[in-house]
Amino acid sequence: MTRPTGPQLIVLCVLAGGAAGWPAAMAPAGLAAWAQSATAALDDAAVARAIRESPAGLSPLELRDRGGLFSGAGAGYRITVYTPQTWVARLARQAGALLSVADVAPADRASLLRVVAAPSAPTVGASRDQSSAVLRVLLLDESRRGQLTPEAFQSFAARHRDLLGGTRALNGMEATFALEDLDALRGGPDREFFVRVEGTGYSKDFKIKRKHFVHLPM
């Protein structure tokens, strides 16, 4: 299959409870991978290792925006960042002891960085206006001058309870980025970068620091 070039996007858009707007694509730049070649999908040995290590805590990077609570925007965004290894480990935990190497599809082995951004739900007792659904996820280089748009994105409904005990939903987003493009944008394996979450209420840049790299195994 020929990969899209330039700013082309493969858009997977599953919207729950309304359409989440996505502005015109901006030209991707790139970022950096960690240990192996960013262009290589996981082979059977790497998949087997991720399955084997999943019970021992091979887990993704999770960051929460605590500032949203004090800015009046809501409880704050939460992002979960998966490399191919931690993505396979997630599949293994979901399947229990039933997942085998043969069960892991090529799409799940692909050289992708997956970012799952949960919306900022309103705090207890606050109005629905004090919240923010996710509209877009970007990657930025260390200087925040270069940026990378996702190869694909998918919206999902994240449910929360209101003050009266009812259930409401706000859109979150799962975005995927090619690790070879991430490699180019970062410009070096030791370079920090940002995940930007843009929403209906506010935007937040999460800095991926060197201390976080241990949670992003390749």
Image (cartoon, rainbow, N blue to C red):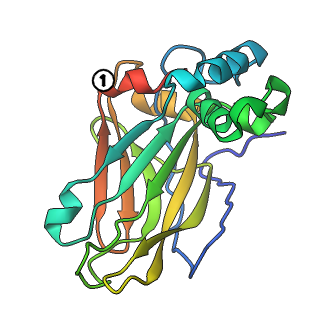
What percent of the width, then of the height, locates residue 156? Answer: 57, 65
Give the image quarter of residue 112. Answer: top right
**Secondary structure found at label 1:** helix
Question: Is 212 displayed left or right of 80 in the figure?
Answer: left
Along the line of sight, the residue nearer the viewer: 75 or 28? 75
* Type of amino acid under label 1: Arg
Q: Quadrant of the N terminus?
A: top right
Along the line of sight, the residue nearer the viewer: 114 or 150? 114
Q: Quadrant of the C terminus?
A: top right
Along the line of sight, the residue nearer the viewer: 25 or 18? 18
Residue where numbered disc 1 is placed = 210
Q: Count of labels shown?
A: 1
Give the residue displayed 37% in from the left and 74% down from the top. 200
Give the residue displayed 26% in from the left and 78% down from the top. 130
What percent of the width, then of the height, locates residue 95? Answer: 71, 39
Residue 17 in the image: above or below residue 153: below
Give the residue displayed 67% in from the left and 60% down from the top. 11
What percent of the width, then of the height, locates residue 99? Answer: 77, 31
